[in-house]
Image: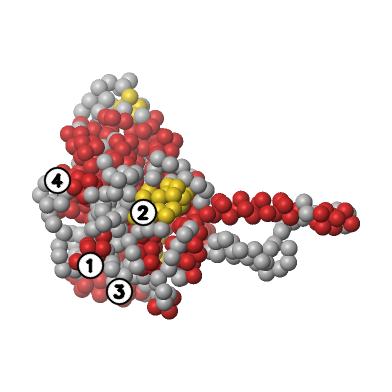
Amino acid sequence: MSESSNNSENSQAGTHPSGADGYQVLARKYRPQNFEDMIGQEAMVKTLTNAFKTGRIAHAFMLTGVRGIGKTTTARLLARALNYETQDIKGPSVDFSVKGVNCDSIMASSHMDVLEMDAASRTGVENMREMLDGVRYAPVSARYKVYIIDEVHMLSTGAFNALLKTLEEPPDHAKFIFATTEIRKVPITVLSRCQRFDLRRVEAGELSTHLKGICEKEGAQISEDGLGLIARAAEGSVRDALSLLDQAIVQRQTDADIVSFEQVRDMLGLADRVRVLDLFALAAKGDAPGALGEMRAQYDHGADPLVIMRDMLDICHEVSRAKALGEGAGFDAAPDQIARLSELAEHLTMGQITRLWQMLLKAHADVKMAPTPLAAAEMALLRMSVAAELPPPEWVAKILETPGATQIAPNPAQSTSAQSAPAQSASAQSTPTSSSQTPSSQASSLQDGPDEIDAPMLQSQSSLAPKPHMQMADKAHFSTLKEIAIYAFDSGQKSLSHDIERYIRLVNFAPGKISFALEPNAPPQLVYNLKEALRNWTGQDWQIIVDSEQSGAQTLRDQARAAKLSRDEQEKNHPDIMAALSVFSGAKVVEVRDRHADNIIKANFKPKNGDA
């Protein structure tokens, strides 16, 4: 369905009859009069054009698509093309540059050889038999007798069966055109006898441009943002868009007024897209009070909670596309909104985004069914805010892959003292945690010093225990952090070894006690994993202190790199190397390898075979 530049009624564009009897709604006034006026259906128009040019015209057509997309209009245009006739053209044609003798009556649904039937009101087998009784008779004045059946999926089983034989072997002068919004309800026996065309939804940008052209013809001024809002609210349906445009035009007080974005938004009962984006951001980062306050403000402003949930689903989908595609996502939005979507994508992992999508999808269904939609929407925002405090699903997956990891703790942020850890581990299965122990009392039980972290992310007595074939006969003893990293690598815990060397900046080391600072991007489970590993390897509890006030030494990885660079520089200046370079003109030192060097961290700097 689209604008018609050839519509005879377009001469009324820009006029405003004072009486209601003289007004025609835009959806009827701008109904397409030829295939060139169809917007968003280029594939179908091209196929039909080629079919008519080559004379390969089917005897039955099935048009399917959402409401208001142009199925009935296309059916009438097809009937017009089949019976097109002028003084010079005597055969079917899709070129309507010259009006044919049958065109006006066919488009007005008054031609005696073009019969339209509404299957929604005439569903029975008797209705079908009555219609098919006339198939055997030749058309009165047109080339073909054309049967247009709208909402064909509403026909009864008997009616479909009565149609089948005629549909398979119709007379040469009969053509059938069916239209339906529920293609799955049409029997496959009928579909297989038709040439099917799927009319697609019109994209919001193309629809907004179409509405702008109609506004110019009507002498109405609506902001581009307002037209974009109407196009998005129509969800690809041109008829819905024109009906909304009709409603938006009357929002102005005088002909010179411009209908603003805010007026269109209030008319549709929608929330501002920017404010919905704010709401999504607040919930995604865990700001429950801010999210609830914004939700209530939008509701008080007239926004429908169900529409807000749908818009948040759209935003979540756009954030996921921004995360996956980056600059190639191609958003249809304002630059500032695109920047905000990219910012959200940068701060959320794909696992968090998909988790939010699932929560919003369930929230949309809950809001639709709830007796109080606002309450259901607010509960959904609370769930999203709580989920923001949980570790990303990707981290959980990595934790579960760790040897011995069996269960995620219900409260990973809860802290317990280093002294009480063995007792809790021994009695975890028999004695429940006292309900009187508050977070403040737990915090006071920590060791003196900066931010000691002993908060388990996993509740498992065997967490991080070496595999049976890797267990050592004697308890291990460590005097340096590098020994711990190497021992973790040899024990099969390469992930822990990697985290130690990459993220820990040592402040102080003593048997049974380690103090260090962490790199900003350190995994949250590193401290707990290290503590549990040391307990299993040494048979005693280690005091682990994260000192955020100290910068600490370089990480083992950085130390290894610095040592290698220093050693390489020394080797390049070695007298033997310098002598070799003087002998071989143009030679240069590319790499220095030492097969006898101590493999400082086996996980990352395993020595390669070869001489220096």
Question: Which residue bears the numbered disc 3?
Answer: 164
Question: Which residue bears the numbered disc 2?
Answer: 544
Residue type marked 2: Ile
Spot the residue most to the left. 371
First reached walking from the N terminus: tag 2 or tag 3 = 3
Q: Residue at x 11, y 46 (%)?
A: 372
Q: Around disc 1, counting alpha carbons within 10 Å, would you say few (fewer than 14), some (14 to 19), or many (20 or more)?
A: few
Would you say the residues marked 3 and 1 are in contact, meaning their CB atoms lie under 8 Å apart?
A: no
For residue 440, side relative to residue 526 (left or right): left
Which percent across, then down, holds residue 146?
34, 61
For the residue pair 186 and 324, the one nearer the viewer reads as 324
The Cα–Cα distance between marks 2 and 1, rounded to whole angstroms, is 20 Å
Q: Residue at x 82, y 57 (%)?
A: 576
Question: Which residue bears the numbered disc 1?
Answer: 426
Which percent across, then down, holds residue 536?
36, 68
Question: Which residue bears the numbered disc 4?
Answer: 375
Q: Is residue 27 visible?
A: no
Classify the position of the C terminus by image quarter.
bottom right
First reached walking from the N terminus: tag 4 or tag 2 = 4
Q: Around disc 3, counting alpha carbons within 10 Å, would you say few (fewer than 14), some (14 to 19), or many (20 or more)?
A: some
Colour option used:
secondary structure
Vertical placement of 140 versus 254: above or below?
below
For residue 392, side relative to residue 370 (left or right): right
Residue type marked 3: Leu
* Disc 3 secondary structure class: helix
* Disc 1 secondary structure class: helix
Q: Nearer the viewer, mark 4 or mark 2?
A: 2
First reached walking from the N terminus: tag 3 or tag 1 = 3
Q: Nearer the viewer, mark 3 or mark 4?
A: 4
* Disc 2 secondary structure class: strand
Which percent across, then down, holds residue 88?
51, 50
